[in-house]
Amino acid sequence: MRRSPLGSAVVNVPRNITAPVTGAVGRFFSGAGLLLRGLGLCLRSPRLMLLGIVPALLSGALFVGAFATLVYFVDDLAALVTPFADDWSTTARGLVRVVAGLAFLGVGGLLGVLAFTAVTLVIGDPFYEKISERVEERYGGTPGAVEVPFWSSLRRSVVDSLRLVAISALVGIPLFAAGFIPVVGQTVVPVIGAAVGGWLLALELTGAPFSRRGLRLPDRRARLKVDRPTTLGFGVAVFVCFLIPLGAVLVMPAAVAGAALLTRRSLGQSVEEG
């Protein structure tokens, strides 16, 4: 075991445990499968599902309203950022503003998903902590667990979430600009956005199980990088589900449960029921 620059412990795990040799594509789908396993755990325990849906409903209503407002004003925003097209022909002007509108909606979706997750995790911190703990108990408990006071845990969660949302905003700027590139902006950029969003979602959702082990954001980033395809598979699956209407509300408990499994796998701990 070694210490991170921030003083928290980082567990050294043999690479063959965290990243089995199944190929990057296989590990990607294995990561997506963790979300399905989380969903299965929640469906077998309806109380877990109810614990997670209540805070998701509260923040979901807020962000649905915010995104609906963006959709309502997207034409005005598109015109605002494309004044150079005012004198173009009707067809050319309309086309460039449709592209601009899609870019706004794409970046808004990326930021909305990450901000929704951050706010929901803060609102429902006690609920999601309980879901995560119950999942880990089912698979053998939490080795090296440390006692973290509620307010300290909440403060750390808020700080980490704000940091990740800020990163997503910085990434969103070049993605918005790239959205104006014909073809690339409508094909490659959404894929990059989903990958970035998936990675950041995985970092957000694994905060509680890593924190129970006394590990901070730099520690979980380092551990999840060891098997990046699995992490991306889980995160992208969550990201896509969160883009579906009501998907974020219904999938949130499963995402928390799956994140507990992802954490265990990244640390070389059992993800099989004994």
Image: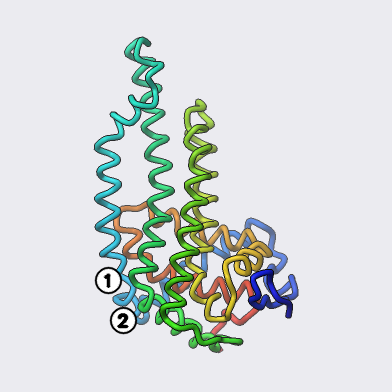
| Circle number at residue 217 | none
The span from disc 2 to disc 1 (Cα, nearest Å) is 11 Å
Of pointers 2 and 1, the one earlier in the residue sequence: 2
Task: Return the x and y of residue 20 as percentages of the image width and height.
Answer: 70, 69
Residue drawn at (32%, 13%), measured in percent from left and top? Answer: 90
- In front: mark 2 or mark 1? 1
Work out whether 236 lies above or below 43: above
Q: Quadrant of residue 43?
A: bottom left
Work out whether 182 lies above or below 244: above
Q: Secondary structure at mark 2?
A: helix
Task: Return the x and y of residue 141 as percentages of the image width and height.
Answer: 54, 88
Q: Which quarter of the image is occupied by the C terminus?
A: bottom right
Residue drawn at (31%, 65%), measured in percent from left and top? Answer: 56
Residue 82 left/right relative to 35: left
Q: Secondary structure at mark 1?
A: helix
Task: Return the x and y of residue 39 as percentages of the image width and height.
Answer: 41, 71
Residue drawn at (51%, 59%), measured in percent from left and top? Answer: 235
Task: Return the x and y of residue 239 as percentages of the image width and height.
Answer: 45, 55
Which residue position is annotated with label 2? 47
Q: Disc 2 marks which amino acid? A: Arg
Q: Disc 1 marks which amino acid? A: Val
Residue 93 left/right relative to 15: left
Which residue position is annotated with label 1? 54
The residue closer to the viewer here, 130 or 262, is 130
Q: Which quarter of the image is occupied by the N terminus?
A: bottom right
